[in-house]
């Protein structure tokens, strides 16, 4: 399951944000804000999706926007929390 985290995250992003692209079209290292027009409201939707999908929680002091700059950074965060 660990190997599919990036794909799961892409599917969740497309589904939750109603993006008009396929999950496969999202590149792991492309900035979500710059490349796909995701705004701060959308980032919060992604946070909720990650919490629901992986059972991780964000404490206010721990939250950093840099965790959500791209799919790779989200996946890295999830992996660090699951150890």
Image (cartoon, grey):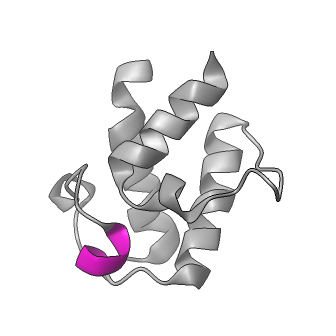
Where is 76 relative to 40, above or below?
above
Q: Answer with the quarter of the image where residue 64 lies.
A: bottom right
Q: Is residue 20 visible?
A: no
Seen at 63% across and 15% down, the residue is: 83
Residue at 34%, 44% in the rendered image: 72
In the picture, the quarter occupied by the N terminus is top left
Seen in the picture, residue 71 relative to 7 is either above or below; the reply is below
* Residue 35 falls within the magenta-colored stretch: yes
- Residue at 47% from the left image edge and 55% from the top image edge: 12
Residues 44 and 24: in front is: 44
Q: Is residue 63 left or right of residue 10?
A: right
Return the residue nearer the eye: 61 or 59: 61
In the image, 78 versus 12, the foreground residue is 78
Residue range corresponding to the magenta coloring: 32-36
Vertical relation: 83 (above or below) 22:
above
Residue 13 relative to residue 80: left or right: left
Q: Position of residue 2 (x, y in %)?
A: 43, 21
Which quadrant holds residue 45?
A: bottom right
Q: Is residue 41 magenta?
A: no
The image position of residue 70, as x and y in percent, is: 36, 57
Task: Name which residue lies at 41% across and 34% down.
Answer: 5
Whether residue 79 is visible to the viewer of this picture, yes or no, is yes
Q: Where residue 54 sits: x, y (%)?
A: 64, 36
Residue 22, horizontal then vertical, whole percent: 22, 63
SS majority, magenta: helix
């Amino acid at each position: 399951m660990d190997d599919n985290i990036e794909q799961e995250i892409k599917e969740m992003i497309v589904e939750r944000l109603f993006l008009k692209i396929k999950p496969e079209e999202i590149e792991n290292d492309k900035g979500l804000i710059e490349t796909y027009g995701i705004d701060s409201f959308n980032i919060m939707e992604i946070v909720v999706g990650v919490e629901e999908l992986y059972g991780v929680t964000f404490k206010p002091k721990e939250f950093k926007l840099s965790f959500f700059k791209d799919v790779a950074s989200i996946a890295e965060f999830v992996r660090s929390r699951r150890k």
